[in-house]
Amino acid sequence: TGAGAQSPRVVLVGPPGSGKSTTARLLAGLLGVDLRDTDTDIEVTAGKAIAEIFVDDGEPHFRALEREAVTTALAVHEGVLALGGGAVLDTLSQAALEAYTHDGGAVVFLDVSLTHVAPRVGFNQARPLLLGNPRAKWASLMEARRPVYERIATHRVDTDAKTAAQVAREIHEAL
Ligand code: S3P
């Protein structure tokens, strides 16, 4: 934690529906620090919603915008930062996260089971990767990504059957 002059630096990672955005907002409030969300940064840069970027420009273009958003945010942001669920797959973003934790930043993996996430994901157009068969697609994303979330995280919180407010308090106490 160093000299204590810096504000806390926390990144939230985890699959779609794990509560990253809501938890990040509540945690930023508890800590009294700024909030940033790379999905929002990407939408501002592109001038359109993420679902539209996928449709108009394709996933590779979205991932390129995401890499830029993640590496920029990690370099400049003080406070709480929420990443999109797939942001951890890019090797440059992984290297930036490793540097961030090396500098004392915390990376928190919001873990959740299919049973608990199912009511929250896939029922709108906002999550293009889950369209069609949201539960099966979520499960296969989570299976592929879990080792990455676990490797890059400094903390893991089991969010099953907890409110975002409880999760935010738990992280606040663990930091
Ligand atoms: C994605 C998750 C989304 C968004 C995009 C891709 C993913 O963010 O970045 O649709 O690959 O898991 P959330 O995790 O906030 O849903």
Image (cartoon, rainbow, N blue to C red):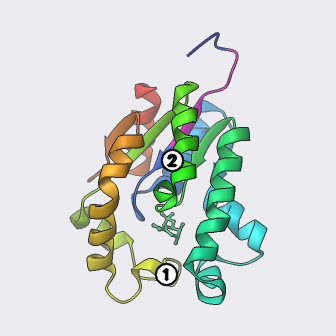
Q: Is residue 155 above or below residue 165?
A: above
The N terminus appears in which quarter of the rendering? top right
**Residue 71 in the image: x percent, y percent?**
65, 49
Residue extending farthest to the top is 3
Callout 1: CB less than 8 Å from ligand 1? yes
Q: Is residue 22 above or below residue 2?
A: below
What crowding class fits label 2: few (fewer than 14 Cα within 10 Å), some (14-19), or many (20 or more)? Answer: some
Q: CA distance from mark 2 to mark 1?
A: 23 Å
The residue to which callout 1 is attached is 128
Q: Is residue 175 above or below residue 64?
A: above
Task: Say the numbered circle drawn on residue 92.
Answer: none
Q: Residue at x 43, y 40 (%)?
A: 108
What amino acid type should be assigned to the residue bearing mark 1?
Answer: Pro
Q: Which residue is mark 2?
A: 94
Q: Which residues are magenta?
A: 5-11
Q: Is residue 144 visible?
A: yes
Left/right of residue 1 with respect to residue 161 in the rendered view:
right
Q: Is residue 6 magenta?
A: yes
Q: Position of residue 28 (x, y in %)?
A: 60, 40
| Image point (51%, 53%), residue name | 91
Q: Amino acid at mark 2?
A: Gln
Left or right: 67 in relation to 102: right
Q: Residue at x 57, y 51 (%)?
A: 92
Crowding at dot 1, Cα within 10 Å, few <14 / some 14-19 / many 20+, comes out as: some
- Identify the mark nearer the N-term, 2 or 1: 2
